[in-house]
Amino acid sequence: MGQKPGTWNRTVNLIATGNRVRIMNETAEVITIHAVRYPDPKRRGEATEAEFIARAAAYNFRLAKPWGDSDSYDVLVGMGPGFWRVQVKRATHDRREYVTKAGGGSRLYTKDDIDFIAAHVTVENIWYIVPIEAFEGRSSLQFNPHTRGRRRYEKYREAWCLLACPPKARGWKDIPAVCRCKALPVRCAVCPNRVERTGEGPT
């Protein structure tokens, strides 16, 4: 039964002796709820990584985590007999776009470090799956999900299909002529099979 408004929660101390229970004392207790402070950058990064793992698992990808924080990548995503090395990032708002770094510390990522960056635009719940070839040598990536026209990284919006196909199947300049993975329930921004809510074709 629910507690009546205005009543106290009670703490009751019990002592059991054989098959009997005696109430020794009874005191009123006020329950105080403490607010949790906004998480620090490391906590936010861990939350973003957890969201990526949950989404990728829902799409039936094979996943593995490296031990510790010594590697440049956060998650391994199964592809054929091997794995893609994925660095997970949280994209932050900067004026009219979202931005994430393309490196760790003062060092930029290269093909020797990772295969993809998975960037999450948290407030929009949009993922960008960007191969290293598209940004190697750059210090940051900029995303514009609501800007008309083709921007550099918009073709990688929700491009989970890139994690499910070999590089040769990506298409010319990473724009596919056919759907790269029909088994996935989500379509990337440039998929020929993508139908926008407006009834228009691929964006």
Image: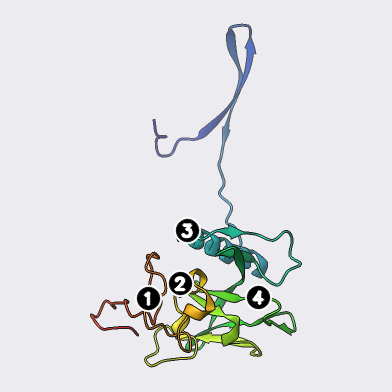
User: What residue lies at 64% left-to-right and 90% top-to-bottom?
Assistant: 138
Label 1 near label 4: C-beta < 8 Å?
no
Q: In this view, does 51 lie above or below 157?
A: above
Q: Which amino acid does label 3 sit on?
A: Asn
Q: Tell me how far mark 4 sits from mark 1, CA to CA.
A: 25 Å
Residue annotated with mark 4: 114
| Residue 199 relative to residue 33: left or right | left
| Residue 161 circle label | 2
Residue annotated with mark 1: 179
Rendered-image quadrant of the N terminus: top left
User: What residue lies at 26% left-to-right and 76% top-to-bottom?
Assistant: 197
Q: Tell me how far mark 2 sits from mark 3, CA to CA.
A: 12 Å
Rendered image quadrant of residue 144: bottom left
Q: Tell me how far mark 4 sits from mark 2, CA to CA.
A: 17 Å
Earlier residue among tags 4 and 1: 4
Residue annotated with mark 3: 60
